[in-house]
Each structure stands twice: as C-alpha cells, then as structure tokens.
Amino acid sequence: MWLQVFLNGKPLVHLVESTREELFAHDTKKYISRTDYPGSIGHYDWLRSSDGTVVGVRYWPFADLEQIEAIRELVDKCSGLKYVKVEPKVKNISVIFDADAFIDEDNSNDQDLGENGIYATDEGDYALCFECDIEKPQIAGVT
C-alpha cells in the first residue's frame, strides 16, 4: 500500500494500492517525483493516538541525499501550514492528519523504512508518499 499525504490548504490523506511511481494524478493535477533516489529517502514514524490510530507521520529525510533541494522546497512549502511541524534542528517534518488529535508519543515509536518520496505539481502543490502496511480504518482521515 502507498499512503499519499497532500500538503495543501488542509491535510488530505489517501491510501492506494500502487507502489512508488515516477508520477501519479490526483484531482486533475499531475504529481511528479522530486527525488530520483530509488527506494527510501528517509525513515518515518507513525504518530498514533492512545488507541493506536495513526493520526500523523514524522518524516526523517536522510541528511546526505543529493535530493536536498527537494527537501528544502518541501520545508518552504510546509512552513505556513498549521498541521505541519518542521523541526530544522532535528531535521524532521511532522504532518498531523487530524487537527484535534492527541499524539501519544509513547505509542508513536514504530519506525518504517519503506519506499517513500516527495512529489510536486508544476503549480507548486506537494505530496509526501510512504510505503504503508497499515489497514485503512487504523488511519485518521484517510480516504
């Protein structure tokens, strides 16, 4: 499964059956991979509520990637979004799917290192995508 997290006005999360691709379409827009690194470009933590529901993701990009420009662009795009927290000192980006969610840090320590990527449209819309083996009902706000 592939979790697509669209970073626009409000969090939009889709779970699709496909895996990492060079491009995909959503809502009449074409999202193109901004990272040509094959496979994983970082690891990520699933942010969970006390009952185990995934309410967000914390993305830790690898520091030595040649795709650092794509990561900088992503940080610039995310800096004004209320549901995104950018931690430049520790180099991670947290995206919360549900604004009212409580993140239980003790329940949010399961890391994944599957395929992931940064995607963008020509209009400047961004999406983060993650390989995911979590069932749809266990993810807040997913469509």
Image: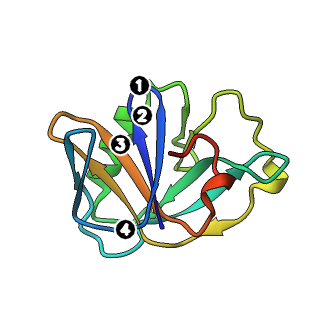
Residue type indicated by callout 2: Cys
x 22%, y 64%: residue: 22
Q: Which residue in the protein does label 1 denote? A: 9
Label 4 CA crowd tier, 10 Å (few <14, some 14–19, many 20+): few
Q: Choose the circle earlier in sequence order: 4 or 2.
A: 4
- Helix, strand, or loop for circle 4? loop
- Examine the image and state in which quarter residue 67 appears: bottom left
Marks 1 and 3 close (CB-CB < 8 Å):
no
**Distance CA(mark 1)–CA(mark 4):** 25 Å
Please tell me which residue lies in front, 22 or 69: 22
In the rendered structure, are the residues bearing label 1 and label 2 in contact, judged by CB atoms less than 8 Å apart? no
Check the image and report above or below for 45 versus 112. Answer: above
> Sequence-wise, which precedes: disc 1 or disc 4?
1
* Disc 1/disc 3 C-alpha distance (Å): 14 Å
The residue at 36%/60% (across/down) is: 117
Mark 2–mark 3 distance (CA, rounded to whole Å): 6 Å
Q: Does dot 2 land on a helix, a strand or a loop? A: helix
* Distance from Cα at disc 4 to Cα at disc 3: 23 Å
Q: Contact (CB < 8 A) between labels 2 and 3?
A: yes
Q: Which residue is mark 4?
A: 18
Q: Which residue is mark 2?
A: 78
Q: Residue at x 78, y 45 (%)?
A: 49
